[in-house]
Image: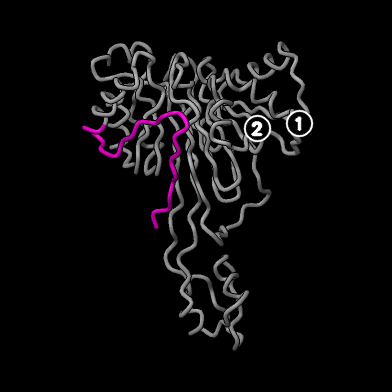
Amino acid sequence: MDFPSRTGIKAPFPVYCLPMNLEAFILGCGGMMPLPSRFLTSVLLRREGELFLFDGGEGTQVSLRKLNLRWKKISVIFVSHTHADHVTGIPGLLMLSSQVDRDDPLYIIGPPRIAEYIESSRRVLDMYINYEIVVKEIAEPGVVYQGEDFHVRAFPLRHTKPCMGYTLEEDSRPGEFHPERAEALGVPRGPLWSRLQSGETVAAADGLQVRPEQVLGPARSGRKFSFVTDTLAFPEIAREVAGSDLFVCEGMFERELLESAREKKHMTAEQAARIALAAQVKKLALIHYSPRYTEFNLKQLLKEAREIFPSTVLSRDQAVFPIEYID
């Protein structure tokens, strides 16, 4: 099955003139049922001006409004699975988007039956939709969305119904530009420098060809964001999320409820931390807490996770996590 791409031909060497902002907004961190201070699971990723939504639980629109986010710029909604606490906020978003001018299609990508859910919601609610909605069901793991200089990959989780995890990973960036090298090779300051940084070979003042690798340092890594929720813990998750700068992962229960987590095919905060440790991620943000935990009780989940992986934080509704370049 073909999945959406924002570019016809992918450039062999991506162009980065300026650093691009990448931020994760927690729209809801709860599981099962919403609470007054905890909406249901939803995370928005903003990459410069483009928005990507991961799940859309009840209360998603409220957090979008509180954070003053331009929800009409959402390009894609990635759905983990079709349990109610992950999708009940989506119909409202679809209807809300019809209240503004929207030229670009909205993609919705998820496991089998997501198309049925969207279509039945549109039909039963008699939605007025004045823009194109493109629903794609994931038949197998792999890249499900291709951007100009990044991609989103889906991989299977182990829950009570088909469920997917996602990673958004940027391509490598060109190495640092060294002006002194360009000048020594006879390339004058100006547009030719920009072309070299963009990966082009240019002609120096004496006509000799100067290649980008002659004036650039080693390629620099892009950033990686991972989203995993509603699953048993198993080793393959660590391989998929390896090296993530931000790993948003469910930590639904504390250690003493491990058996309950297994029965319900969820994981504990400690198990999430062990995955983070094995995957060598930079930061773990726990999400999808059981409603049994009050705000005070969440400290126990954090404590158990930090015993394994110190760079763990609790996600909270309307929390913002900037994702920075490491080089």
Residue 129 vertical placement versus 68 (above, below): above
Disc 2 on helix, strand or loop?
strand
- Residue 99 quadrant: top right
- Seen from the viewer's position, the closer of residues 97 and 162 is 97
- Sequence-wise, the earlier of marks 2 and 1 is 2
- Residue 38 quadrant: top left
Q: Which of marks 2 and 1 is in front?
A: 1
Outermost bottom residue: 206
Q: In what quadrant of the picture does the C terminus appear?
A: bottom left
Amino acid type at image mark 1 = Tyr
Amino acid type at image mark 2 = Tyr
Disc 1 on helix, strand or loop?
loop
- Apparent side of residue 245 relative to residue 187 in the rendered image (left or right): left
Q: What stretch is highlighted in magenta?
A: 306-327
Task: Say whether residue 193 is magenta.
Answer: no
Q: In what quadrant of the picture does the N terminus appear?
A: top right
- Apparent side of residue 283 relative to residue 40 in the rendered image (left or right): left
Residue at numbered disc 1:
131
- Seen from the viewer's position, the closer of residues 327 and 14 is 327
Outermost left residue: 307
